[in-house]
Amino acid sequence: MAEISYRNASCVYQGADQLAVDSLNLDIGDGEFVVLVGPSGSGKSTALRMLAGLEEIDGGSITIDGADMTGVPSKDRDIAMVFQNYALYPNKTVGENMGFALKMRGVPAEERKRKVAETAKLLDLTEYLDRKPAKLSGGQRQRVAMGRAIVREPRVFCMDEPLSNLDAKLRVQTRTQIAALQRRLGTTTVYVTHDQIEAMTMGDRVAVLKSGRLQQFSSPTDLYDRPANAFVAGFIGSPAMNLFTAPITTGGVEVGGTTLALPRDAIDRLAAAGLDTVTVGVRPEQVELHRDGTGFGVIVELVEELGSESYVYARPATGLTLGPDGTPLTFVARSASRSPAELGESVTLAVRPDGAVHLFHPVSGERIDG
């Protein structure tokens, strides 16, 4: 196990006009499971490859247990990598694939066999040890790739989108297994994914990246409850947070010709910031659907029935048309009832009396604390 520190770590690809990873600062504790998440091109895989020694560190440093890894070859870092494409040898059996790294290290055959057997039992692969990868399912191949990493007993696991090739049901099952296995082994793990649900359900802490820069590094619940900026607010959560920029009025903000009331402390923060407009964020579960005129008017465009709950997607009837990112504005509300509204129906939306309202600067996107 190991402690990892990124200190202003940067990486730039030849010919690129901006840094792939820009001054990344992270402190990862011994035995911690940390997830790097973000959209394509955010720098998350590059940051992982820098740790593994597969990309050069062009600025700053990365340390493992206090030792600077700049210029240290991958083979000398005691890191095990699990890739998206499994990278198994097709002509070797499961047991041979899992034990190959130990064989290359000169580990005696009997010890290799023992370690492979122990790891196979841990991953429910014992009955498959004599099979070739072609005879395995996608989930089983991924477990073999995990087993190959585990038998090495490395200081750090690096996992680069290992579940991307699996179908939806198998992804859920396998991510649960990986998270439980990591807790059992206690090995420091850095996991990369573009799937924010994976990030929220697996990580002890989650680092959200955008365009090579760290946006927030917190626990999953903190990311959800107190996003540092509008990007994190819109990225974390499914469906995404409702975000819209609106003029500030006495007592709240104007939405669709009506006033969305804000708590007294929120109004005071806006007054202190000296703003005329503000970007407002409300989670779908904090929005109520009404037919009595309470709230602001919307027109229902889509209803998603999920069995235990429904999500209503609606566009504003008047006023706002575009969100903060310039795309057409759609509000999402969660309902515990089935068929809460009809397509094309005019209804109103209102924030629940106890609902949390998030406020962000309309230009910088940074959270207005509260």
Image (tube, rainbow, N blue to C red):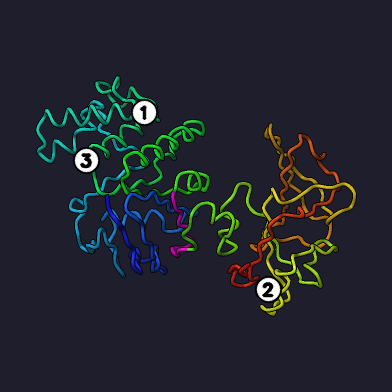
Q: Is residue 172 found left or right of 59 in the rendered image?
A: right
Q: Residues within 10 Å of mark 2 (few under 14, many from 20)?
A: some
- Which of the numbered marks, if any, corresponds to residue 269? 2
Q: Is residue 261 above or below residue 250?
A: above
Residue at 18 percent of width and 53 percent of height = 76
Q: In this figure, which residue is indicated by the disc labeled 3?
A: 152
Residue 285 lies left or right of residue 84; in this view the side is: right
Tell me the crowding category of disc 3: few under 14, some 14 to 19, or many 20 or more residues within 10 angstroms, Cα based. many
Q: Do labels 1 and 2 touch, CB within 8 Å?
A: no
Query: Does the magenta portion include 205?
Result: yes
Q: Quadrant of residue 324?
A: bottom right
Determine the secondary structure under disc 1.
helix
- Amino acid beneath label 1: Gln
- Residue occupying image coordinates x 76% and y 36%: 337
* Residue nearest the viewer, comparing 228 with 86: 228
Residue positioned 33% across, 37% down in the render: 86
Report the front residue among 80 and 135: 80
